[in-house]
Image (spheres, grey):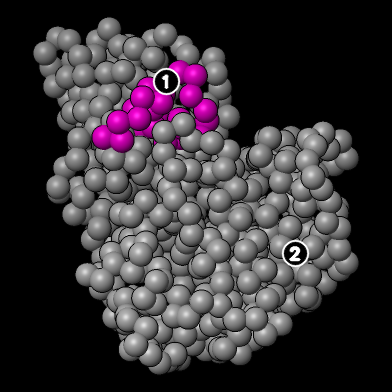
Amino acid sequence: MITHEVRARKSAENLPREEQLAWKIAQVAVDPVEVEGDVVEMIANRIIDNAAVAVASLNRAPVVSAREQAQRHPYAPGAAIFGIDDRVSPEWAAWANGVAVRELDFHDTFLAADYSHPGDNIPPILAVAQHLGCDGAALVRGLATGYEIQVDLVRAISLHKHKIDHVAHLGPSAAAGIGSMLGLEAETIFQAIGQALHTTTATRQSRKGEISTWKAHAPAFAGKMAVESVDRAMRGQTSPVPIYEGEDGFIAWLLDGWEGVYHVPLPAPGEPKRAILDTYTKEHSAEYQAQAWIDLARRLGTERPELRDPANIASIVLHTSHHTHYVIGSGANDPQKYDPTASRETLDHSIPYIVAVALQDGGWHHVDSYAPERTSRPDTVELWNKISTLEDAVWTERYHDPDPDKKAFGGRIVITLTSGETIEDEISVADAHPAGARPFGRAEYVQKLRTLAQGIIDDAELDRFLGLVERLPELTPAEVRELNLRAPAGTVDAGTTQGIF
C-alpha cells in the first residue's frame, strides 16, 4: 500500500491532477490487477448476504416505496429489482435495491476512522452490470474496486467527527467501482468520483435523535448518484476540481479545514485489491457495535436467568468505545433511545434497549425484537432504564487499532445486583466476526439467506441464485442479468403509495 498525504490547498497552488486524491483513486480503479481467489470468494459471500437481507425487507414500507418509484422508470435492457420481474433504468434499480439491502441494518460493515457498510457498493455496480451486459469477471473487478476504495477512505478520513454522513465515502467508491468494471479511462473515472462526492455529502442528522426511514435511503441515494455521475462523466461532463483538496472543497470547509492532514492508503500499481477481506458481516439485525453486546447478553441471560428480572438488577453499565457510547449509547443524550414507542430505526441504534432484550430473550430476531409488543413490555422497559454506557479509553483505543486482529467493538459489562453482588464480563468482537467464536463462512452466508428468505422465496429459486453465485467470475452477461431473486406472484406488496412519478 502507498500512503498518500491529503490536505486542503489554496487555488493559487494549482495542485497538479496527478497529486489529487480523486486522480489517485482513479488510478487504482484502472489498474487491471487480477482479483485473487479469496477475494472472489468473499465478494460472492457478500452478494449472498445482500440478497438475504433484501428479501427479508421486501414488504417493509421504505422498500415498497423505493420499489414503486423504480417501477415508474421501466427500461430495456435495464436492471433487476429484488423480488419482482420488472427491469428498470439502472440508477433506479440501484435506488430500490439499495433501500432493500439497507433497511434492516443487517449486512456487512467496516469501522475505522469512520463507519461504513461496504456492501452498499453492490446494488449500483450490479445494476450497471446488468443494464450494460457486463460479464461476471467484470462485475467481480468492479466490486473489488468499490470495496477497496470505500475501505481505504474509511481507514483515513473521519466524516462523523464533523457530523457528515458516512455515505460521502460511498459515492466515490461506487463511481470508481463502476468505472473499473466498465474499463473506463482514468480521466472519466476522476470526473465521476468528483461529482459523486459533491452530490452525496449530507449531515448525520439522519442517524441522530428520532431516526427516520431516510437511514435506509441515504446509501441508496449515494449509489444512485454514483450511477448518474459516471453517466455524466462518460458524456464529457466535468466536476469540481480539486474536489477533496480545493480551497472551497471538502476538506477545507466540511472536515478538518486548513489544519487537517489525512493519510489515505491505496494499493500500489499492480497490488491486488484485498480490502473486502478486512470487512465483516452481521449475524444480528442491529447497528454493528451492538453485535458483540448481543452475543454477550444472550450468553449471560442463559447462564444466569435471574439477570432477566429487573427486580434483581440495580444497574448495568457498559464500559465501551467512544463511538458506542456517544452514537448508540446513553452518551448520545437522545431520550428516544429509552422510548418504548421509538421507531425501529431508532431502536437498532439504542444499545441499552438491545442489551435488555438480548439478555431477556437469549437471542435476537430481525422482526420480533423490534415489535411494539416487545418494546413496550413493562419488565423490559424497567430493565432497559437501568442500562447505561460509559466511554472507556482502553476500548476506544482498541476500536481504532489499525491491526484487524486487535480491533475490538465490544466492551466490559458491570452488572450490580440488588443483593450487592457484582457480575463482570467482557467481549471483544462478535461471534460471527473473523476473529470471533463462530466466524461466518460460505455455509453461514447461505444459511442466513435461507433463513431470511423462508416463506418469501421458493427453495428452487434460492438454489438457482446460489448456483449462479458459485460461478460468479465465469458468468456470461445473460447470467449476470439473472443475479436476482424473484418471489412467487402475490408475495411482494404491489404498493399503493402516490407521488409525482
Q: Amino acid at mark 2?
A: Pro
Residue 34 in view in this figure: no
Residue 114 in the image, given as x and y percentages of width and height? 35, 58
Residue farthest left in this picture: 420
Is residue 335 a member of the stretch shown in magenta?
A: yes
Q: Does residue 388 lie above or below 466 as drawn? A: above
Name the residue carrying label 2.
Answer: 90
Mark 2–mark 1 Cα distance, whole angstroms, equals 39 Å
Q: Mark 1 falls on what kind of element?
A: loop
Question: How many residues crowd mark 2 within 10 Å: few (<14), some (14–19), many (20+)?
Answer: many
The magenta stretch spans which residues?
Answer: 331-357
**Horizontal arrangement in the rendering, residue 213 relative to residue 417 (left or right):** right
Quarter holding the N terminus is bottom left
Q: Mark 2 falls on what kind of element?
A: helix
Secondary structure mostly seen in the magenta stretch:
helix
- Viewer-proximal residue, 452 or 323? 323
Is residue 423 a member of the stretch shown in magenta?
A: no
Q: Amino acid at mark 1?
A: Asp
Residue farthest front in this picture: 12
- Viewer-proximal residue, 30 or 474? 30
Residue 389 in the image, given as x and y percentages of width and height? 24, 32
Disc ID at residue 339: 1
Residue 362 in the image, given as x and y percentages of width and height? 41, 26
> Which image quadrant for residue 402?
bottom left
